Image (tube, helix red, strand yellow):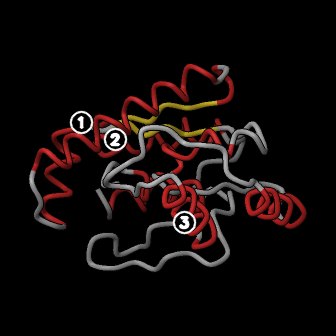
Amino acid sequence: HRSGTSVTAGILHKLGVNMGEDMISGNKHNPDGYFEDKNVVDINRQILDDNGGNWLNPPQRIVMNSTDDIKQFVKHREEKYTKWGFKDPRTTLTYPVWQNVQNFNIVFVHRDNEDIINSLMRRKRRDRKVYKRCTDIYKDRMKKIRKMKEPENYLDVDYDELTTVPDRVVEHIARFVNEPVNEEAVELVKVNP
């Protein structure tokens, strides 16, 4: 949350990777949208709820849930799209369940924890310690997922680099998904830094 994943998912979408069919609309925090498929968000919320947590108060560990919803989601997307993806920051917490269905390629977005906390505070005031604990957990889980992946199955995107040299970062993302760069993807970053 507030780490640059929406703009990164938007770039993927503009490059031709279908990021969802029923996406969460934009609002004052993300005017161009979140590029989150409501189905994925619902699946992840249910996994977290079943494990006694939520995005802000992550469970210590994820106990295996039924993967039927995920299997159905993946099957539908595989049948319908050549290139597809999904974005929901909660997947950082629920990935143990998703990985049992398919070995996904992942784009990791890295942003300074203090910048994330400040952005969260602007959106909704809470005790900074709550956001600090949450961002630390997300960073730790992201590192664990990254260690499980082969280098060709993930891409690291630095948010600060994305906002300062968008052309170069969009080019890296395009190469990762084997699509040509287009100005629409670059422009998305320039209007939503």
Looking at the rendering, in which quadrant would you find the N terminus? bottom left
Q: Are marks 1 and 2 in contact (CB under 8 Å)?
A: yes
Nearer-N-terminus badge (3/2): 3
Q: Secondary structure at mark 1?
A: loop
Indicate which disc residue 41 carries: 3
Task: Tell me where residue 138 sits by quadrant.
Answer: top left
Q: From the viewer's side, name the closer residue of 172 and 54.
A: 54
* Quarter in which the C terminus is drawn: bottom left
Please give left or right for residue 72 compared with residue 91 in the image.
right
Cα distance between the residues tagged 1 and 3? 24 Å
Q: Compare residues 70 and 63 and report the one nearer the observer.
A: 63
Mark found first going from the N terminus, 1 or 3: 3
Density class for disc 3 (Cα within 10 Å; few <14, some 14-19, many ≥20) is some
Residue 159's label in the rendered image is: 2
Going by the image, does 103 lie left or right of 56?
A: right
Distance, label 3 to label 2, CA atoms, is 23 Å
Q: Where does residue 186 sit, x and y in percent of width and height?
A: 46, 54
Q: Give the distance between the C-alpha atoms of the residues marked 1 and 2, in whole angstroms.
A: 8 Å
Query: Residue flagged by tag 1: what amino acid is it?
Result: Asp
Residue shown at the point (42%, 57%) measured from the top left: 7
Amino acid marked by disc 3: Val
- Give the numbered dot on residue 112: 1
> Quick check: 66 above or below 152?
below
- Check disc 2 and give the amino acid type: Tyr
Give residue 72's position: percent from left, percent from top.
Answer: 82, 63
